[in-house]
Image (cartoon, rainbow, N blue to C red):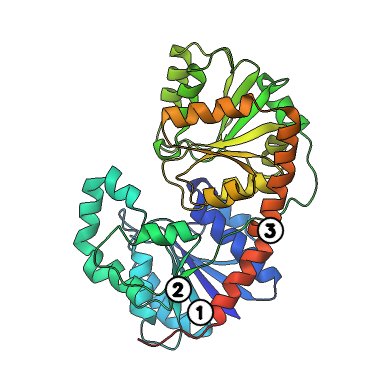
Amino acid sequence: MKILQMVQTLDPSTGGVATAVLSLSRALANGGHEVEVVALDDPKAPWLRRSELRVHALGEGRTSYRFSGALLPWLRQHGSRFDCVIVNGLWQYQGFAAWRAFAGSSVPYYVFPHGMLDPWFKRTFPLKHAKKWLYWPWADYRVLRDAAAVIFTSEEERLLARSSFWLYRARERVSPLGAEKPLHTTTAELFLSKFPAARDTRVLLFLGRLHPKKGCDLLIEALGQMPSEGAGVSLVLAGPDQVGWADKLRGRAEALKLRVPVIFTGMLEGELKQSAFAAADAFVLPSHQENFGLAVVEALAAGLPVLISNRVNIWREVEADGAGMVGDDDLGGTTRLLQRWISTSAAERERMRADARRCFDKRFEIGTAVASLVALLAERPAST
């Protein structure tokens, strides 16, 4: 099958969408499919030099809408070479360009919203939501309506999407994302030698963008609520700071006079990231909105129990498999979550590690995700 992936950027520091596109595309290619990616990246972007995929970088789109005058002509010239097209994300020009190029054609296009229809955004950013209404009826509504399928990565995401806009019509399907199992075991020493403050502590690892949506502040506040119980742990906040939030988080940790180290590492990749998983006692993500949580899945792949909020859309699967603990996305819920983990016995923690690996193997290994997606793409879209 010849597949075209469309994405605004492949910059890994932007988070889950780029990571998901890269992971799925590599796995599809390894399965014998021909995969190409068209992205609105600068052709000289450093992350493209490391990509083994065939990427067509058309230059950065203009304004926050990422309009590109080169995209539609490229799709019309080359789109017929592909058996199908996958649009990753909403609210930017690429989806509208795909609709103009492929709606009603012999080349079906599919849309991964990647959580961008979650009603959390409507509640949290009402002005931005009102702005989206200005072009919803003539752009993204049509993009979803005419897609061969709108692919949600969890049942939770599918149900939530229905309450974002009253004018909504889509052929809904669910196909989970996945992660690659680590090829080899990495020890904790690489990470601990680079960040020695974490040595001889029970590391609580947050891995992701430092952003208010992710609930990083809740972790700091929760540690401040439990000065005696929290002794002996450390909090590692690993991820890029794209909104200038790290200094505020550091200031709050200092103001609370925490008895535990709070370690900011910046973005971790490759072997160093795997070493951080090996050093960690648990993975933590009290996010206010998380479509799927690829970092959660990567933690499970490393056999790391996950402490997550019930706003991470795969929380039901994690809870059902005993692969971690789940709480509310507020200070009380996060504090109780950390207290439960800290008071958990060593034997129970070890059992949860084994369950984390089983949860990953059963639900989230990349081969399972690819098989699900390929089966979906092989279906003939129902006529309407």
Decide if residue 234 is on the left or right side of residue 310. right
The residue pinned by badge 3 equals 362
- Position of the N terminus by quadrant: bottom right
- Quadrant assignment, res 233: top right
Q: Amino acid at mark 3?
A: Lys
Q: Is residue 78 above or below residue 35?
A: below
Q: Position of residue 164 (x, y in %)?
A: 30, 57
Residue 217: tell me if it is visible. Answer: no
Q: Is residue 241 left or right of residue 30?
A: left
Q: Are marks 1 and 2 in contact (CB under 8 Å)?
A: yes
| Residue placed under numbered mark 2 in the picture | 110
Which residue was labeled with disc 1? 84
Query: What whole-number distance in Å separates the C-alpha atoms at marks 1 and 2?
Result: 8 Å
Q: Camera-side residue: 224 or 268?
A: 224
Please state which amino acid type lies under the numbered disc 1: Cys
Foreground pick, 113 / 322 = 322
Whether the residues at callouts 2 and 3 have beta carbons within 8 Å, the answer is: no
Q: Residue at x 48, y 71 (%)?
A: 86
CA neighbours of label 3 inside 10 A, class few (<14), some (14 to 19), many (20+): few
